[in-house]
Image (cartoon, grey):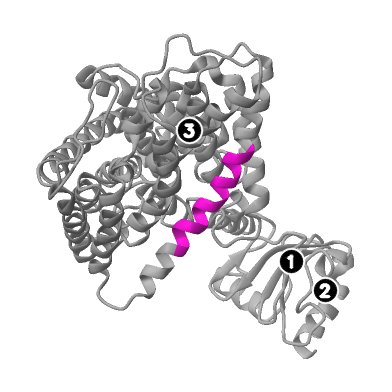
Amino acid sequence: MVSDGSPATDESLGLPLFRPGTRLLVYCLAVGLLGAGAALGFDFAVEAVQRVLLEGLAGYRAPTPGDPGISPNGWSLLWIPAVTTLGGLLSGLIVYRWAPEAEGHGTDAAIAAYHQRAGEVRPRIPFIKAVASALTIGSGGVAGREGPTAQIAVGLGSILARFSGLRGQGKRHLLLASMAAGLSAMFRAPLGMAIFSVEILYSGMVFESEALIYTVISAVTAYAAYGFVAGWDSLFQVPADLRFDEPISLLGFALLGVLAGLFAALLPTLLYRTRTLFRRIPGPPHIKPALGGLLVGLAGMAAPEILGTGYGWVELALTGGIGLGTILLILALKAPAMAVTIGSGGSGGVFAPTVAVGGMLGAALGMVVHEILPGTHLPVAAYVVVGMAAVFAAAARTPISTLIMVAEMTGGYDLIVPAMLANVLAFLVQRSLTRGRKYPTLYESQVESRDDSPLHQGLLVRRALELLEGGDLHPEDVKLPRLVNLLRWGEPVELGRGSVALVILEVEAGSDLAGATVADSVGRIAGVTAVAVLRGPEMITPRGATVIKAGDQVLVVAAPEARKTVARAAAATRHG
């Protein structure tokens, strides 16, 4: 009970609680079970399509350490482009007919739902995504299962949130918990995926730490439920004696980190430029995944090793069952094939192909290091594991969670030290090389920090307005519509008696503000702080280097002694 005698409530849920947040914890357990079910169901769907199309028609199955696989030959090679084209066509028809937002890699869609749609996902998305992605991956498309699993689990969590009346921050936290659940089950990596779900939102070193307790609960639940049904083995099996005990080998891992950063800098540009090329092709959008499937299939006729997720070949690299020629072939062709599959509108994730590229990079470098660096005896498998982590950590800007995630997926906990070194170097190299690019990471919906998130910007404005409502302003003096009008016409609005005021500056062409940075213009006026730059429908959080453009509206808070200066600045912007 609160002081007024009413029952305590959790505002994010709108339901009476015995303790704040209790119901959200229960919902996290529920989405943990839903995530495990999503991973099991999606696994089944992909395997079923693969048995019918890729294995049944094209006669191809990727090898694993215990299975030599099936290699296509003769006339069966001709079925490869037919199968990949069919998978792309069916996927495109389903996606663009019923849910266009289900195209591409699903993790990015989940990130966009968090930042831009307050955690809202249409109820049909998880089902459309499951079918379309199973067709794309099962037919040999070069894509992974993690993105679709994330979007499927997030969609199911959104249905639960809608059914239970969950809203606000609770709904957004449940979205992240749902993502963690699906990924934890799919990759048997509960801790890594719990952290990944709060790290992947931002391209800088920023975490949505408030949600971590919820992602941990859902990830552990999903891992336990999935393991109970499908077993507890790690996704990849590594040699039992794989451990770091040679300091000299850190030189090789440092070089691997730098190379991983270079590869990771190329991947986003390759992916999104390919997507741009496909979007420029005339014709209905549902045909383009079929064209992408055809191109991948033609490449697959010459190099079947590039088809699918690539995990089978990574497992062979871990056990030393793959030659340098095959390693270099996969390293050269896997990323372009992924870009064509996903960039054309195919439905699948980027994690598996990126990890496969990293594993092959590590395998190739490991073989070289053994020849040129005396005194090192670490097996090539060590470089495979670290390469898997480093390339994805840099390309996705998730160095911390990827470190833990790959250790869980392989059981290679004894390689934490070299993986830490390689991840950090790869992250720094990738970040420096992609600075200023339109697509610096694999996930275009990522933002640099909370200040750049539309969600947090909206919350900031809401809290500012709540402050106005609860401050010294008298409601009879300034109603909210009047506040908007006052700001629109440049009229200062008092935030307190004798205190600061809100002022909006209209920036016209030819003014002193137009073309200047915030630091060199508004920032030089004592007692004045810029709080927002309004550019059309967009609200920009001002930084020192933010350039003010003609037509912008700059919202500032001005102290009493700065009022005349602000007024002169406003007059200058209005009248030039």
Left or right of 485 in this view: 11: left
- Where residue 394 appears, as percent x and y from the top left, is 56, 41
The region drawn magenta spans: 258-273
**Residue tagged 3:** 388
**Residue tagged 1:** 556
Q: Which residue is painted at 54% across and 46% down in the image?
A: 264
Left or right of 309 in this view: 517: right
Count of marks placed on residues: 3
Q: Secondary structure at mark 3?
A: helix
Who is closer to the viewer here, 59 or 466? 59
- Where residue 474 appears, as percent x and y from the top left, is 65, 63
Look at label 3 and name its amino acid.
Met
Who is closer to the viewer here, 460 or 393? 393
User: Can you name the residue that lies furthest to the bottom here?
Assistant: 575
Q: Are marks 1 and 2 in contact (CB under 8 Å)?
A: yes
Look at label 2 and name its amino acid.
Val
Q: Secondary structure at mark 1?
A: strand
Q: Which residue is painted at 60% across and 46% down in the image?
A: 262
Q: Which residue is painted at 59% across and 73% down in the image?
A: 484
Residue 271 painted magenta: yes
**Residue tagged 2:** 566
With respect to residue 390, does 379 lie above or below? above
Who is closer to the viewer here, 161 or 452? 452
- Mark earlier in primary sequence (1, 2): 1
With respect to residue 151, does 326 lie above or below? above
Who is closer to the viewer here, 5 or 462? 462
The N terminus, quarter of image = top left
Look at label 1 and name its amino acid.
Val
- Mark earlier in primary sequence (2, 3): 3
